[in-house]
Image (cartoon, rainbow, N blue to C red):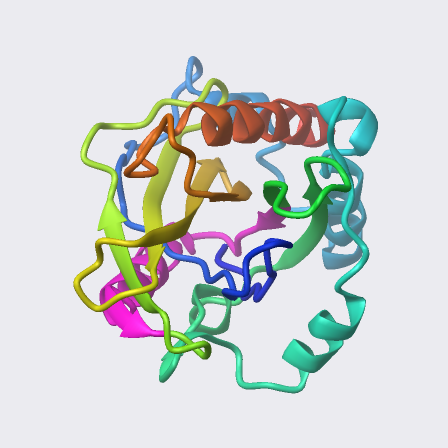
């Protein structure tokens, strides 16, 4: 699910937003589908809340240079008192389609200024909520396709054209948000790549934010983000396996 996150890449004054567009869609489950490898039964809400926390990736799972990012607790508390909006006037997908259980953990790729940020979340959907989950993301993407953020930067959201595949996932949804300094969108400051995956009723999501690298001037290379979400999906499937 989309989780509102206004994290700042150190060394860059811009505030990071999230975004997404549907890039892949799978049909019903079969005995060979990834969803067959997670528990099909409905656990209690308390059990699911405990399991999504267990399923979350850790520093040990990620390895170097990743460390926990707990420096922005004050910013998180400030966000908690604001409307749950993805961009001005547009509710997040979690507000539009609240999950049954949700857990999140924030990381940064080292301690130097300007390092990449990674936000991981695991959630469970209510039975039959798959379409609402998809529709909520699509609504947010459309509503936040082009806008100005709180720092008056110019934000655009671009769909991932190629189908995305993540081992263990029935469905993958992805988009790239680009934050520009100028209205002509010639000065790209940084990008946020967002990948949602679903395995049965369980979703694994990664938000990967990085200052625009010279080696990837358009911020279109999803290699890092796909690698991160693949690790999360693997752990999620293991946590929910019967």
Residue 75, quarter of the rendered image: bottom right
- Quarter of the image with the C terminus is top right
The residue closer to the viewer here, 1 or 215, is 215
Q: Magenta stretch? A: 120-148
Q: Position of residue 102 (x, y in %)?
A: 66, 56
Residue depicted at x 57% and y 21%: 37
Q: Position of residue 35 (x, y in %)?
A: 49, 27
Residue depicted at x 30% and y 60%: 135
Tell me: residue 73, above or below residue 172. Answer: below
The residue closer to the viewer here, 189 or 31, is 189
The residue closer to the viewer here, 160 or 41, is 160
- From the viewer's perspective, tell me whether residue 28 is left or right of residue 72: left
Q: Position of residue 160 (x, y in %)?
A: 25, 38
Q: How many marks?
A: 0
Residue 139, quarter of the rendered image: bottom left
Residue 148, quarter of the rendered image: bottom left
The residue closer to the viewer here, 124 or 150, is 150
Q: Is residue 146 magenta?
A: yes
Q: Is residue 43 magenta?
A: no
- From the viewer's perspective, tell me whether residue 64 is left or right of residue 139: right
Residue depicted at x 45% and y 67%: 97
Residue depicted at x 27% and y 35%: 24
Q: Position of residue 182 (x, y in %)?
A: 27, 66
Residue extending furthest toward the top = 32
């Amino acid at each position: 699910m989309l989780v509102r996150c206004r994290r700042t890449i150190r060394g860059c004054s811009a505030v990071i937003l999230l975004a997404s567009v549907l890039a892949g869609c799978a049909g019903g489950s079969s005995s060979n589908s990834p969803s067959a490898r997670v528990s099909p039964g409905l656990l209690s809400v308390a059990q699911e809340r405990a399991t999504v926390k267990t399923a979350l990736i850790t520093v040990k799972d990620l390895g170097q240079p990743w460390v926990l990012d707990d420096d922005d607790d004050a910013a998180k508390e400030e966000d908690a008192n604001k409307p749950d909006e993805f961009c001005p006037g547009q509710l997040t997908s979690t507000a539009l389609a609240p999950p049954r259980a949700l857990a999140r953990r924030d990381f940064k790729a080292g301690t130097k200024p300007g390092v990449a940020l990674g936000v991981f979340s695991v959630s469970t959907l209510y039975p039959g909520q798959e379409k609402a989950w998809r529709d909520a993301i699509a609504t947010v993407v459309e509503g936040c396709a082009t806008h100005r953020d709180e720092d008056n930067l110019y934000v655009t959201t671009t769909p991932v054209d190629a189908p995305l595949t993540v081992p263990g996932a029935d469905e993958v949804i992805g988009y790239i948000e680009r934050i520009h300094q100028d209205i002509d969108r010639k000065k790209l400051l940084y990008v946020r790549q967002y990948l949602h995956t679903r395995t049965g009723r369980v979703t694994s999501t990664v938000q990967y934010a990085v200052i625009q690298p010279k080696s990837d001037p358009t911020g279109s290379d999803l290699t890092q983000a796909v690698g991160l979400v693949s690790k999360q999906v693997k752990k999620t499937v293991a946590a929910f396996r019967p």
